[in-house]
Image: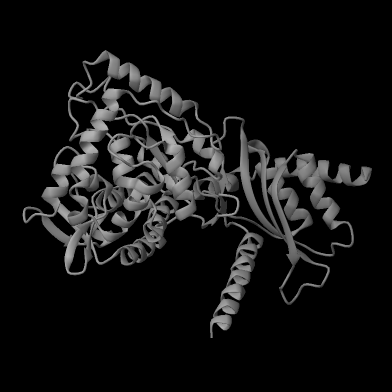
Amino acid sequence: MKTELVEISGQKEEASKEKEMHAIESLNRRGSLDSNREDGRTTVILTLTLCNVRKSEFSKAAKVFEMLETQIRHFETRRTKKPKNSDDDLDIFVECEVHSADVSILITSLKRVAEDVKTRREDKVPWFPRKIQDLDKCHHLITTYDPSLDHGHPGYADLEYKKRRAFFADLAFNYRAGEPLPRIEYTTQETATWREVYRKLSSLYPTHACTQYLDAFQQLEKYCGYQEDNIPQLQDVSRFLKEKTGFQLRPAAGLLSARDFLASLAFRVFQSTQYIRHFSSPMHSPEPDCCHELLGHVPMLADKDFAQFSQDIGLASLGSSEAEIEKLATLYWFTVEFGLCKENGSIKAYGAGLLSSYGELMYALSNKPEYKPFDPEVTAVHPYQDQAFQPVYFIAENLEDAKAKLQNYAIKIKKPFCLHYDPYTSSIEVMNTPQKVKRALQQMKEDLKKLCLALENLS
């Protein structure tokens, strides 16, 4: 053991003298190393082949990592498949952290005890949540239409309203995943505003909303307290959605950034506001409020195709560039917010922005706006209006067709990794090793077996 330590130490000194820093700089330029760390450590992804592992080569390689105080994130071995190698040879995959100054020494030292030492690219990507608890960090607000900052907001000069809004904001910011959703005691004035909005919009739904919306709305009235004189509680609505499609709600303080909001959808979580619009403007709100969430979004989230469509947008957003986030947010705008679909020869609304706005719902299904077929490539780059009625609406053949088109679009988004959503743990796994892919495939095989058995029983 002492001899091996001396040998490795000698390799370290010799490697330093060989001045291979130019090679490491080249690796950095290609993106093989992630050195954007405040602690001076770097993530390195390596593949290498160890020959005659029954002898001392494995121990020598381990000592290289130990001498340089390397932290191993992930380690995999498998029998090498190269013809010239023996049964005692192993291919090794290592993801590790090492001090930036020691990267050249690590690679040089490994080359002395292993073959085919290679580094693999690890692109820098924006942070994204990996598990549902990480959504506690996804609360960045867009304050453009905040009543405390926007002079044009109906509640800007109302101190009581702004105080009430601060109360709702505190509830949302202090909420943590897994906790019961806050129950709100709404004021008489807030309930009166809800009543006016509810009464007027519900009169339009039978003729303007799609079938999926109408079916869910009827159930929400029956089971979740949807009625003129009662603002439903998020906890009751969330429980209903969980049973229908696996979606659940969590409180939001206001209009979230596109990246944070879309990321939540990947976990089948919808961030919902609990405050209500200012009483002086019941038919219009410059920002999302509980009328928009509960009357616009919630009924559609109870539909399985629409729920999958929403989650697909969320999954596509994880780790995407800012340019792709902007396109996905635009897609969301023209579908989930202002989407129309064909139904029995007519055009119906399924977008929440329409179904929570009496004026725009009437306008969208009149002969005034322009209609275009839903094509994600076109829709994603189309300009939109957030302070006036849309001049153009995109029409889906049906929700299932819209879902299929979105999935095809999402596949084309370039990322340095693939993601897998695990519904059992409500977590996202980066499929960056063969073992992870194998585990996912094994689960799919088991599910397919069960489905095949079910078909046999039906035949």
Which residue is nearer to you in this view: 385 or 297? 297
| Direction from residue 251 to residue 426 in the image, left or right | right
Q: Quadrant of residue 142?
A: top left
* Picture coordinates of residue 125, whole percent (x, y): 48, 45
Residue under the point 38% across and 57% down? 303
* Picture coordinates of residue 313, whole percent (x, y): 39, 53
Quadrant of the image containing the N terminus: top right
Residue under the point 11% across and 49% down? 363
Q: Quadrant of residue 378?
A: bottom left
| Direction from residue 326 to residue 419 in the image, left or right | right
Work out whether 80 lies above or below 166. below
Residue under the point 34% across and 29% down? 275
Q: Is residue 78 visible?
A: yes
Q: Quadrant of residue 340?
A: bottom left
Residue farthest to the bottom, as pictured: 459
Which residue is nearer to you in this view: 106 or 413? 413
Residue farthest to the left, as pictured: 368
Q: Is residue 268 visible?
A: no
Residue under the point 53% across and 39% down? 134
| Direction from residue 225 to residue 106 in the image, left or right | right
Give the image's coloring scheme.
Answer: one colour
